[in-house]
Amino acid sequence: MAFAIEWGAKEAVGTMDKDTPAVARAPLTPDERRMLGIGHPDYEFPKEVHNLLIAAYEGNWALSEMADNKASILMGASFVVFSLSIADVASGKASFPLLVLTLFSFAATVLGVLTVRPNRLPKFKLDPNTVNIMFFGSYSNITREEYIDQVLKILSSEEETYRRLAKDIYDHGCILRADKYRWLYWSYTLFLVGLVITFGALLLKIFLELKADGLLSTIPPLP
């Protein structure tokens, strides 16, 4: 809470008088603090700013968990298909459609693993003033004392706190787009393409077998 402390003025001259008692002004109201503008140390952000950033932060985490769940579902389906067909493929009894399905299922499984696989976090020297206090991969590169100092320094300013939170939200969103959802997209795409090609290859195989057996001529024409 901001307080404005003012010493009394000596009559109309405006000079300091140490014998004059101090006069404490009333604290600024929330509306008055908001009128100070961003950048002022006493500026108070509306509560909607806090709610917006928290909603965005929770939304990113929900999307991250959703990507992991979707990747796990696809990995399970692909692994079942791959496990059932690998015996026939190894024994040389697999047909062309089964080979196609096995290949695409394996590729989809690999991309699904890349979706849920954590990134490697190497240890490196980091300037404490640039550390992300909300991400362990960043603040684990500085000492505990430096981390505590940075947390207290950031929390002493409401504006800086919101800036750091917004920065973390942005960085997390970039990781979601560049890593998780990119691998997840290609994983589902390959699995879908594999199903379509497998179905087409199966129809082609049936057609060629019917043609080789001379059974196509026995099929009555459409009226």
Image (cartoon, rainbow, N blue to C red):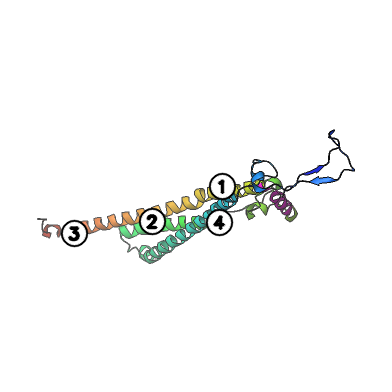
| Disc nearer the start of the sequence (1/3) | 1
Q: Residues within 10 Å of mark 2 (few under 14, many from 20)?
A: many
Relative placement, left or right, of 37 versus 85 is right
Question: Of the residues shown, which amino acid type is indicated by label 1?
Answer: Tyr
Question: Of the residues shown, which amino acid type is indicated by label 2?
Answer: Phe
Question: Considering the numbered disc 3 on the image, is that residue within a helix, a strand or a loop?
Answer: helix
What residue does disc 2 label?
A: 191
The span picked out in magenta is 146-158
Residue 210 marker: 3
Residue 170 marker: 1
| Disc nearer the start of the sequence (3/2) | 2
What residue does disc 4 label?
A: 118
Residue 144 marker: none
> Residue 58 placed where, x, y %?
54, 56
Q: Which is in the foreground here, disc 1 or disc 4? A: 1
Distance between mark 2 and mark 1 Cα atoms: 31 Å
Question: Of the residues shown, which amino acid type is indicated by label 3?
Answer: Leu
Q: Which is in the foreground here, disc 2 or disc 1? A: 1
Position above or below: 31 against 102? above
Labels 3 & 4 near each other (Cβ < 8 A): no
Of residues 181 and 34, the one drawn nearer to the viewer in this rendering: 34
Is residue 113 at all visible to an observer of this figure?
no
Relative placement, left or right, of 222 versus 166 is left
Question: Considering the numbered disc 2 on the image, is that residue within a helix, a strand or a loop?
Answer: helix
Could you tell me which residue is drawn at 36 percent across and 55 percent down?
Answer: 192
Distance between mark 1 and mark 3 Cα atoms: 59 Å
Could you tell me which residue is drawn at 65 percent across and 51 percent down?
Answer: 138
